[in-house]
Image (cartoon, rainbow, N blue to C red):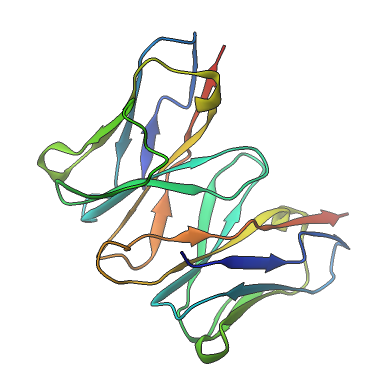
Amino acid sequence: GIQVEQSPPDLILQEGANSTLRCNFSDSVNNLQWFHQNPWGQLINLFYIPSGTKQNGRLSATTVATERYSLLYISSSQTTDSGVYFCAVERRNFGNEKLTFGTGTRLTIIP
Amino acid sequence: DTGVSQDPRHKITKRGQNVTFRCDPISEHNRLYWYRQTLGQGPEFLTYFQNEAQLEKSRLLSDRFSAERPKGSFSTLEIQRTEQGDSAMYLCASSLEGYSWYFGNGTRLTVT
């Protein structure tokens, strides 16, 4: 099956700093999503981004499908950004319509 | 719309007992997914439905696990004869035709 690698595994930053999280995947994909899992376990959908660039407030994401990677940018970090960020991909073909998750990047924002 | 809801939030059970979890998806979503997450890991796929049809099951889903989605609305996940290794967070998600996915808060199962 498709492999998803995220880096770095852990990131500790001061409030106000910027960060870049990376997701590499091993095959072409039809679907790529970024999620934030907050300290209470809730998975929040941040972006549906199989290709191209999107922005939502302080967050933006870029997927370069031909090179099999995606980046999530967080600017002016706030303590509420803490949690685990997951990249998940889907290689849509018959019998394989599901997201495969990476192991995540744990982000800790220090006030 | 209140999003995806799961019930219960927490379940503690003794080994060997049966448990059932419920998921109510976003009303217009035709796809519903069950995942399992253990501490420090990403969610792992268990099964998914398109409307009422169960289209794929993971090899993680042993014979003790069964899922249903009657009438293409809510779904239930039942675990029979629970084992300590079943302790995990069980997550449900829904989507419209597989695009943006939305997860519920999960059901945390502890088997003692």
Residue for point 85% across, 62% down: A15
Q: Is residue A57 visible?
A: no
Q: Between B108 and A89, which is closer to the camera in this rendering?
A: A89
Q: Position of A13 compared to A5: left or right?
A: right
Q: Between A47 and B40, which is closer to the camera in this rendering?
A: B40
Instruction: From the top left corner, tell me how far across and down residue A10 is, in percent.
Output: 80, 58
Q: Position of B9 compared to A4: left or right?
A: left
Q: Between A39 and B47, which is closer to the camera in this rendering?
A: B47
Q: How many labels does the image show?
A: 0
Q: In this view, does A13 lie above or below B94?
A: below
Judged from this view, the residue extending furthest toward the bottom is A66
Residue for point 60% across, 79% down: A70
Q: Is residue A36 visible?
A: yes
Q: In which quarter of the image is the C terminus of chain B?
A: top right
Q: Position of A87 compared to B97: left or right?
A: right
Q: In this view, does A85 lie above or below A75?
A: above
Q: Is residue A95 above or below residue A65?
A: above
Q: Which of the 4 image quadrants contains residue A79? A: bottom right
